[in-house]
């Protein structure tokens, strides 16, 4: 018997069986249907207009990005998504975009004085050591 869905990993990328097997209320079945896609609301529009919250007694689920482009999309639309009942862990869209650029992550960490939190950097595999 499954309990309420606590986490939605989006977009659907074929992980639903695996995340369901974790038995923590995670699912991966919401399809992204284009650039203007937005997940369905958790709180019904009629409840929003009347100032009521969702009828469910369980807390609303978390919306977790499973790709860089969806992470940016959720960051850009976070105010609306929260208004319609989703819980999010995100940041300003500009920060999400910068963090998604793997090639420039080290530069971003250096500018932000966070290099000490990254593994040691090597310019080539020939000079690399383990553990880093």
Image: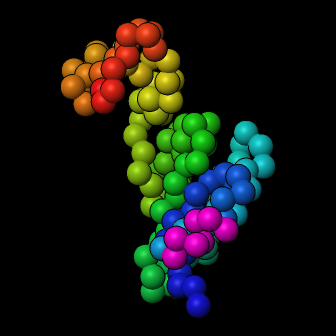
- Pick the front one: 80 or 32: 32
Image quarter hosting the N terminus: bottom right
Where residue 118 appears, as percent x and y from the top left, is 30, 28
- Residue 95 visible in the snapshot: yes
- Nearest the camera: 81 or 74? 74
Residue shown at the point (60%, 42%) measured from the top left? 67
- The x, y position of residue 103, in whole percent, is 50, 18
67 left or right of 122 in image: right
Q: Residue at x 57, y 37 (%)?
A: 68
Drawn side of residue 41 relative to residue 52, left or right:
right
**Frontmost residue, 86 versus 48:** 86
Coloring scheme used: rainbow
How many numbered marks, from 0 up?
A: 0
Residue sitting farthest toward the right: 33
55 in magenta: no
The quarter in which the C terminus is drawn is top left
Residue 128 point in image, percent of width and height: 37, 16
**Which SS type dominates the magenta stretch?**
helix
Query: Which stretch appears magenta?
Result: 17-23
Residue in the picture at 58% in, 65% down: 19
Whether 17 is drawn above or below 70: the answer is: below
Inspect this view and state whether residue 40 appears.
no
Percent of width and height locating residue 54: 51, 79
User: Which residue is at a point 33% across and 26% down the rendered structure image?
Assistant: 130
Q: Nearer the viewer, residue 125 or 73?
A: 125
Question: Could you say which quadrant of the image residue 42 lies in?
Answer: bottom right
Q: Is residue 9 above or below residue 113?
A: below
Q: Quadrant of residue 119?
A: top left
* Image vertical order of residue 38 relative to residue 93, above or below: below
């Amino acid at each position: 018997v499954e309990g309420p869905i606590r986490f939605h990993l989006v977009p659907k990328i074929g992980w639903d069986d695996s995340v369901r097997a974790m038995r923590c209320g995670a699912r991966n079945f919401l399809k992204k249907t284009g650039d203007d896609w937005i997940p369905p609301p958790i709180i019904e529009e009629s409840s929003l207009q009347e100032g009521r919250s969702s009828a469910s007694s369980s807390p609303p689920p978390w919306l977790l990005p499973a790709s860089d482009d969806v992470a940016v999309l959720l960051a850009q639309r976070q105010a609306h998504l929260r208004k319609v009942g989703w819980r999010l862990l995100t940041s300003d869209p500009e920060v999400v975009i910068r963090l998604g650029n793997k090639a420039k992550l080290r530069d971003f960490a250096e500018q932000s004085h966070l290099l000490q939190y990254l593994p040691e950097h090597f310019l080539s595999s020939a000079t690399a050591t383990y553990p880093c």
